[in-house]
Each structure stands twice: as C-alpha cells, then as structure tokens.
Image (cartoon, grey):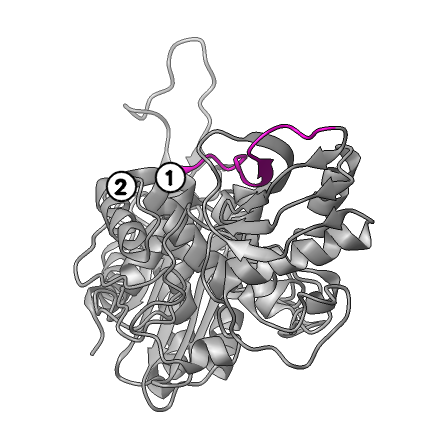
Amino acid sequence: MPSRRSAVSRASIAVAALVVALVAPVIPATAQGPTGVAPPGTTAVTQKLSTPILSARRVPNLLRSRIADAELTAAVQDVVDQSPETSCLSVTFQGRPVYDLNADLPVEPASTNKILTSYAILQEAGPDERLVTTAVAAAPADNGVIRGDLWVVGGGDGMLNTAGYRLGLEYPEQPFNEPSVLADRIKAAGITEITGNIVGDESRYDDQREVDSWPDRYRREDTVGSLSALVVNRGVTGYADSPEQTNGTRLPGDPPLLAAETFETLLEDREIRVGGGPAVGPAPTTSTEIARLESAPIRDIVAETLGWSDNTTAELLTKEIGVRSSGSGTTAAGTQTTRDLLAAGGFSTEGLVINDGSGLDVDNRLTCGLLVDLLDSEGLDSEIGAGMAVWGQRGTLRKRSRGTEIEGRVLAKTGSLTTPPVAALAGWVSTRSGDTVTFAFIQNGTGTDVGLQDALATALFEYPQAPTLDVLGPKPPTAA
C-alpha cells in the first residue's frame, strides 16, 4: 500500500545505516601539515583531529534528516495503520518529500477542494480587489425622488448577512458584510422616495441555484445557500420582513427576490417611501449609480472560505472565476478554469475531477500529492496560508486541542462528509524546533476518524526528532 515516498523513507534509513558503517577512521589522528615538516621560521604545532575525516560527523545534515525522517515514519505509522485503505498522507519539509502514503491516489477531498478554488480566484483576481453590490436607477433622482425602479445589482458577494441571520449561524463570529450599509448610503445620497419597484439583478452569474449532482438536502439543511450573484442571508426565507431578528424557519428561496424584499424593508425602516414592491430583472444598460457597497477584499473572502469552510462563498467564487476567465458566470466555467490554471502552474492534474468549488460533490477527486505541491508552492506566508483555520484558535479548528502545545501551531483546511465518509486536513505545522512541515491527510471510506488528525498533528509538531548538529557535527581541532 505505501507509495513511492514510503519507499523513500525506508531507503533513507538504509542510506543512513550504510553511511555509518562506512565511515570508520582510516587516517592517523595527528598531522603537522601537508609534508609533516613545519615551514622555516615557524614553530610546529601538532593538531589532533577530534573527528576522523570519514566519520559520520562529516555528514551531519544528511544523517540528521535521515534519522528525523525515520522517527517521523515510526510516529505516523499508527495513524496510517488505523486509516482506511483508500486514504492518502503526504508530508514535505522545505519541499523535500518526507513521507507519503498513496500520494498519487485520487481521493474524495471534501472541503480541501476549497484550496484549489482559492488558488484559482487569486490567480484571476488580485488579492485587494473587491466585489461590488450597486443600487442604480434609469435616471438621476429628481429632488430626492427616483421616478421608476431602483435596481440592486449583485456582484457576487456571498457574505451579505443581516443581524438576524447571523444570530443563527453555527459560527456567529464568522465574517460578514452588512446589507444595511447600502440602505444607509442610499439615504445618505438624499433619496426620500422610490416611485417604482426594488428590483434584484443577478445577471452577473447564471440562475442555477445549486450544482446538479448535489442532493436536495444540502440547500434544505442550509449546508450551502441558494446560489446567485445577488444573495442576502444565503438566499433563505424568514428574514426579508425582519432582517434584524432571528428566525427559526429558514427554507431555500429565490435569492434575488428575497434580496429585493430585504432591501425594501431596510429602506422603509429608514423612512424612504417605496411605491412598488420587490421584483427581479436586469438593470438597464445605461443607468445612474445611486450608491454602492464593496465586499471585503478577495484575500479576506478567501480567508472566510478557507477558515470557516463556507460552501456558499466557495461556489460564488467559482462562478466569479468563470466570469473573469471566459465571461460565463457558471460553475462549469469556473471549475474548468481552475483545472486549466493548475495545469498552467505546473501541477499534476492526473486523476483530478472538479465538479464544484466547495467540495460538496461526492465525485470530486484530487491527490494528496497535488495538495502538498500547491501548498508548498504558495507557502505559509501567502493569502492561502493566512486564510487557514488555526488549531485551537480560529475557524473550523478553533475548538481543537485548546491549551495544548500544538494550539496555534497548525494552520490547515478541514474537510468532512458523512455519505460517503470523508475526513480531511491539509496545511502546515510549525514544529517544536521552529521549522514548518507541509502535509495533506485525507481519509476515505468506512473507518474514517477525525481523531487521527490530532495524532498526526502532534507527530508533525515533534519533527525533526533527531540528534542535534552539536552531536552529529564535526568538532573543531584541539591542540595536542
């Protein structure tokens, strides 16, 4: 079952043993110079070599890495033995393969798929760019009155959540963008009346509410929102008439219509009269901007997607990738571009299957080798690194091992599905010695155990467990 890097680990142990066996002292322990005679006018000093030239001390870094790799292999073997056969584990240190189990086996990634989506959007859009939701009219306001409709044009911001909706979130500290700010800005623009409708415009993306292969329960259980370029409160019902109050009845709805209803409520709460009602449709090609609401920077949307594993933002980012690459705001365009960008970046796409941006599709496939190569290429100081959940502190890892030595030392993307079972974790570990180890660990099938992630993280935290350079390194010569 072990793949090529497991073989590498076994070979490393053999190489280390061979080096030790071959480096017996073969020269005298004293020397006086190249000829054994002191140059004229000098005093001969006998030097005593503390370490024979062919001693193992002459290859300390080689031995140290080999011994450390062997220690890590032994430490993670129990994790491997308890994992389902269709699992993969890849570990690298400074880009060097340390341990691999089935590194090239395509497995179901669950939410680690969001790492690929994050990479692609950061290639297509700068990290400081923002998505924009605008309020526009067919003509400028007349003494504070918009004669006709006001369109709210969606820009793909999936973080528009009102106060009432946020009260019911699993992670109430999850970042958001406040829709009421747009209503405040419309009022600040001097608008006192809209004679027509509030119209929701979602035309930036298609109107496909979900990926065809998903089970209906994903939207029904609010695992992912109803997809739209204009979506407030992830497109669920129960908040349009009372955006600031919590509501236990949350059902999938029509996102642009619900958004229009919500903004109508917010405007009326600010004493702006609305003559019509909520509606859906595209804004006129020539229009006047009344107000705008910018999203968080792309880097922060990526962080929200990765750190909190937000399926809705991941799917909207996928459609945004499609818009920017081909002008098509569809899931298919976004996933195709993601594949193309990975290939163009020099990453192996062998066995890669991407059907959505979030990892909810059970037919998605990627390899631990691809994840580790991508993470090594990006680095811990990248936008992807900054966006990861933090062990015991932030995001989906915030409750893990609080108060232990590894709290704050693991930055990673989690992933889980129940049918079929998937437990995944990929990211970086800051080791006890201050080094950084990159890893990807994905379990597929019956017997998946999230607890094994804790054991792996602890083992990686201790890497490299090996004799120090003070022990293995050559000692300086001493006078006789």
Label disc, if present, on residue 123 of the rendered structure: 1
Residue 18 vs residue 374: left or right? left
Q: Could you say where residue 205 lies in the image, as x and y percent from the top left?
A: 39, 50
Q: Residues within 10 Å of mark 1 (few under 14, many from 20)?
A: some
Q: Residue furthest bottom?
A: 446
Residue ID at (58%, 68%): 396
Q: Residue furthest left?
A: 350
Label disc, if present, on residue 345 of the rendered structure: 2
Residue ID at (67%, 37%): 146
Labels 2 & 1 near each other (Cβ < 8 A): yes
Judging depth in this view, the residue of 293 and 428 nearest the camera is 293
Q: Could you say where residue 209 lies in the image, as x and y percent from the top left?
A: 41, 65
Residue type at mark 1 is Gln
Q: Does the magenta-highlighted stretch encompass residue 288?
A: no
Residue 129 vs residue 57: left or right? right
Check disc 2 and report its element: helix, strand or loop: loop
Residue type at mark 2 is Gly
- Quarter holding residue 231: bottom right
Check disc 1 and report its element: helix, strand or loop: helix
Q: Residues within 10 Å of mark 2 (few under 14, many from 20)?
A: few
Q: Could you say where residue 264 lies in the image, as x and y percent from the top left?
A: 68, 55
Image height of 223 relative to 128, above or below: below
Residue ID at (61%, 50%): 198
Judging depth in this view, the residue of 418 and 268 nearest the camera is 268
In the image, which residues are magenta?
123-142
- What number of labels is visible? 2
Of the residues tagged 2 and 1, which is closer to the observer? 1
Q: Does the magenta-highlighted stretch encompass residue 138?
A: yes
